Image (tube, rainbow, N blue to C red):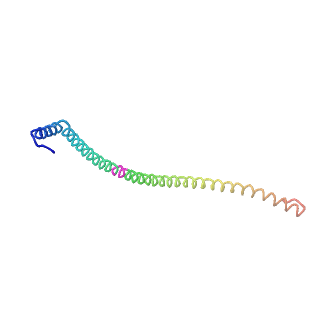
């Protein structure tokens, strides 16, 4: 059977000393390392959440800037379109005025040419009428 004597107390003291030494040498550094690791993980999680929120805000800002740039581009395009339409209208008006001026100049030239042609035809008509009358009558008219 088991006898209880002074060695039992030595063994108990030995176990307590061993637990104390193991606590100092092994368990406490491991617990400290685990605490540091947990603290670092918590810091990393905080940084991750902070960076995630920052990236989300930057992404939203980029989206807003892109939307604003598109609006500005559309308004600029519309302004350019209006400017182009006005330039087109002014060019068309200028061309129309030039065409009208050219048309009136050509019309005056045609009228002048028609007047000259009438004068020459009128003189020739008199000669042709006398020749025709002479042929019909058979003698020359004076």
Residue 59 position within the rendered picture, expressed as x and y whole percent measured from the top left:
35, 49
Q: Residue at x 21, y 43 (%)?
A: 35
Q: Residue at x 52, y 52 (%)?
A: 91
Q: Residue at x 24, y 46 (%)?
A: 42
Above or below, comparing residue 25 to residue 93 in the picture: above
Left or right: where 56 falls relative to 25 = right
Left or right: where 136 falls relative to 122 = right
The kind of secondary structure the magenta stretch mainly shows is: helix
Q: Magenta stretch containing residue 97, yes or no?
A: no
Q: Foreground residue, 71 or 82?
A: 71
Name the quadrant containing residue 133.
Answer: bottom right
Specify the segment rendered in magenta. Answer: 60-65
Residue 109 position within the rendered picture, expressed as x and y whole percent measured from the top left:
64, 53
Residue 70 position within the rendered picture, expressed as x and y whole percent measured from the top left:
41, 52
Give the quarter of the figure containing the N terminus: top left
Q: Residue furthest front?
A: 1
Residue 5 position within the rendered picture, expressed as x and y whole percent measured from the top left:
10, 41
Left or right: where 98 falls relative to 142 = left
């Amino acid at each position: 059977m088991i006898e209880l004597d002074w060695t039992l107390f030595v063994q108990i003291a030995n176990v307590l000393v061993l637990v104390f030494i193991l606590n100092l040498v092994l368990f406490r550094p491991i617990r400290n390392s685990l605490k540091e690791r947990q603290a670092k993980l918590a810091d990393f999680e905080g940084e991750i959440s902070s960076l995630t929120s920052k990236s989300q805000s930057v992404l939203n800002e980029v989206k807003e800037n892109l939307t604003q740039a598109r609006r500005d581009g559309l308004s600029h395009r519309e302004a350019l379109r209006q400017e182009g339409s006005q330039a087109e209208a002014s060019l068309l008006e200028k061309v129309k005025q030039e065409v009208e001026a050219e048309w009136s100049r050509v019309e005056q030239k045609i009228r002048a040419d028609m007047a000259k042609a009438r004068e020459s035809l009128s003189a020739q008509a008199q000669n042709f009428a006398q020749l025709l009358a002479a042929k019909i009558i058979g003698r020359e008219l004076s």
